[in-house]
Each structure stands twice: as C-alpha cells, then as structure tokens.
Amino acid sequence: MADLPRDMPREGRLPGAAEQDGDIVLHVDMDCFYASCERLREPELRGEPLVVGMGYDAGEEHGAVATASYEARDYGVESAMPISKALDRLPRVAEHPEDPDAGHYRPVDLEYYQEIARDVKTILYDLSETVREVSIDEAYLDVTERTAWEVAEGFARHVKQRIQSEVGVPASVGVAPNMSAAKIASDHDKPDGLTVVPPEDLREFLEPLPIEDLHGVGPVSASEFHDIGIDTIGDLAAADLEPIEDRFGERGRELHFRARGIDDREVETRGKPKSLSREQSVGTPITDPPELYERIDALARAVTERAERKDALYRTIGIKIVKPPFDVNTRERSLSGPVHEPELVRETARDLAREFEGEEVRKVGVRVSNLSFAENEQADLESWEDGSESGSEDRQPGAVKGQVGLGSFETGE
Ligand code: DCP
Ligand code: MG
C-alpha cells in the first residue's frame, strides 16, 4: 500500500502520532431497519418480502416506500419509490394469497421504531463512550480504547451479536481507521455485514469501489465524476487535486482526501463526554524513561487543551500503559475537587507512569475524567432532546469490562 500523505493535521492530534496506528472507528447501520422492527413484533414476516410504506395505509396505494426487506429489494422495490410502483413489482399478499411472488406491506410506525432504536443505542453507549448518532439506525463509535486491530473483527462480531441477542434486529458493522471508511465498510457486506479494514489495507480496499460508494457522492456528482473519467474511488484518489477542487470546490477536496483514505473528523459524542483522553501507539516499544515522559507530556497537553476547548473541569487524572503484546494497565488518581490545571495533569500522569519506567511500552494514554462543565452548555443539551436517554450523563462508563477487546481505560485497574 502506498504511504498515506500526512499533510492533513487534525485538531488536537499529536505531532508525530502515526495516523496508521491511530483511531479505530466502528460504524453501525441497521439492516432494512423499519422492516426488521416489524419482523420483531410479527415474526411470520421473517424471510418474506416486506415493504414499509410512509404515508401508506393498509389496502391503499398511496404513500412511498420507507424501506423494503432484502427479499422485496430482489423484486426491484426501493426506498422512496411510490407504493403504487412497488405494487406493480411486488403485489400484495392480501390480494394475491396464492402468488408466490407477492409481498407484505405495512405502514410506518415511527414511535415503535424509535423505541427499538433507543435499545440499540443503549448498547452502543455501553460499548464506547464516544458515540455519534447520525440517524435513527446509524451511529459511529470511537472504539480505539476498547479494541485493537488484531482483535477488531471479534469486537465487531460481539457488537452485532449483542444487538441481535438483546434487541433482536440485525445490524451491519464496519471498522476502519476513520469515519468515512467505516461507513463504506459497514455498507460493503450488507445485510448482516461485518467488514474490518485495518489501516494497512485501507487504500487497497477503497481503490476498486465505485465512486458512488463514497459517502457524499450522490447521483448528480457521481455522473459528473464519470464525465471526467472518474469511475472508482481509486480513480479519484489518483486524480490531481486542483481540477477536482475547481470543479467541486471544498467538497471536492474533502472527497479527494477521503478517497485516499484520509478523513480527519473525530467521532464526537453529542452532548457532554464522560472523559477526555488521548493515546498513542509506538512502532518500537519504548524502554527509555525520558521518551516515555516526553510522550506523557505531549498527551497530557493534548488532553488539557481539549478540556479547555470544551470548558471541562476534571477531578480524576489517569494514564494507560500497554505493554506488548496487549497487557493493558491503567492507573488513576482523584483530586478533592474539579480543576483545570494542565501542569497538575502532566505531573500526575508522569507520577503514575513511574512504576512502568524501563519496561517495554507500546501504547501510552492520558485521560481526565469525572468531568464537570461550565454553565454555557445549552447548545449541547439540545442534542438530547430526541429523548435518547442512553446518552445521558448517568450512563456509567466501563460496563463492557472483560468483554471482547482489551478492557477499557477507566476500568482496567
Ligand atoms: N428511511 C425512510 N426514507 C428513506 C430512507 C430511509 O423513511 N428514503 C427510513 C427507513 C429505514 C431507515 O430510515 O429503515 C434507515 O435508513 P437506511 O438508509 O439505513 O435504510 P435501511 O436500514 O432500511 O436499509 P439498509 O439495510 O440499506 O441500511
Ligand atoms: Mg440501515
């Protein structure tokens, strides 16, 4: 694989932190979600062609397809298609009981689907502190601290299995080094998909995919790309940036980077985080104490800068030290009250790291937790108004301790 360009500094990213060994992002997208919810309360619909119609009433022909089960998609029924057209392709069982090529139709019941979605999201918040919900059936998780590339597939399988066994609906999961690639990965093997793309495979994974697979490329820009001979993500990655930028503007630039496997967006939970942390892996394990402390200092600085940007005070300061191969150690110390004192974070982190002096260390992390926030956080609160209790402040971190993965930073002690 070609080397990834490193010319896209990311906010708060440590200088010298290798993108390749950086974040692990997991994207979950439920399969034919509304249809799966209907099947949950009406198991006879499993395995059957099923259409869920918006603005649709039983026996009528008005409305549009919200979603169709994969069996119904085989008949050419698609989201947003008028119900009347769907009925041409897939007649209703009610009127054609003997027809083996007939399907079931149900009207949308959003309230019920939202309830199921909340149960799914509760599991996701249990799996990671950093969850970005993007729609009723879709979310990004930063799972950097919960897993490692070597075991990411097992972790992803565990996520799918938990959703299936605890809620009863199927999900597709993608794991990749950034949000854009994780989204493509979860879509890659749908339904019931599981695709893990470690950093070293990213370019190779993206290259042959049609340009339409890149999130943000709709039918209009896809046809514009085809006009200039760009049919695959690899074509876009190989194209000169300048003409792309001229034609598509800032978005073109962004797509060009994403095609090359670069996306510096960070997964950010809406609302208030429970903790802030930064960690860094090293290729060759550190044994030299000055180098260990230098990294601790840089991580402490990154974390406290982030706390400052978020107006966060912290009461607990912690470190994570991973010894080869995956021996995760965490230590933390709590203060008597919430503070924002970068120097104290640095000193405490150094002090906690002292017992690892001279040992082989392949990953170092610094965390502040037990956060409290300054008053002006109204904007953040708004994002919870959709009733998603799962993201509330009461959520306890570390509930997945001991499950697949490497244990969590805050519970490892
Ligand atoms: N939805 C809708 N109208 C659309 C697209 C989607 O009402 N035009 C609703 C119904 C879907 C849900 O949103 O079930 C989630 O959207 P997705 O795009 O994730 O589609 P599905 O989950 O249905 O299918 P897939 O398996 O492709 O993810
Ligand atoms: Mg979906």
Image (cartoon, rainbow, N blue to C red):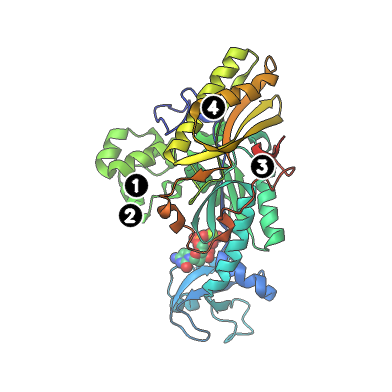
Q: Could you tell me if residue 288 is visible in this image?
A: yes
Q: Which quadrant of the view contains residue 155?
A: top right
Label 3 vs label 4, nearer the camera: 4
Q: Residue furthest front?
A: 336
How many C-alpha atoms fall within 10 Å of the one at disc 1: few (<14), some, or many (≥20)?
Answer: few
Pair 1/3: label in front: 3
Q: What's the amino acid at mark 4?
A: Leu
Q: Say what secondary structure mark 1 lies in.
A: helix
In terms of secondary structure, where does tag 2 sit? helix
> Dot 4 corresponds to which residue?
344
Q: Amino acid at mark 1?
A: His
- 315 relative to 395, above or below: above
User: Can you give x and y, in whole percent of width and height, for residue 122 in the image?
Assistant: 62, 57
Give the residue at the far left of this rendering. 246
Nearer-N-terminus badge (3/4): 3
State the count of labels.
Answer: 4
Q: Give the Cα separation between the discs numbered 4 and 1.
A: 56 Å
Q: Earlier in the sequence, mark 4 or mark 1?
A: 1
- State the residue at coordinates (46%, 49%): 213
For label 3, the SS is helix
Residue 153's disc is 3
Q: Give the residue pinned by disc 1.
A: 226
Side of 196 where 411 appears, left or right: right
Decide: is 179 above or below 3. Answer: below
Name the residue at 48% across, 22% down: 16
Q: CA distance from mark 3 to mark 4?
A: 38 Å
- Per the image, the residue denoted by label 2 is 220
| Nearest to viewer (mark 4 / mark 1) | 4
Q: Earlier in the sequence, mark 3 or mark 2?
A: 3
Can the viewer see residue 193 in this picture? no
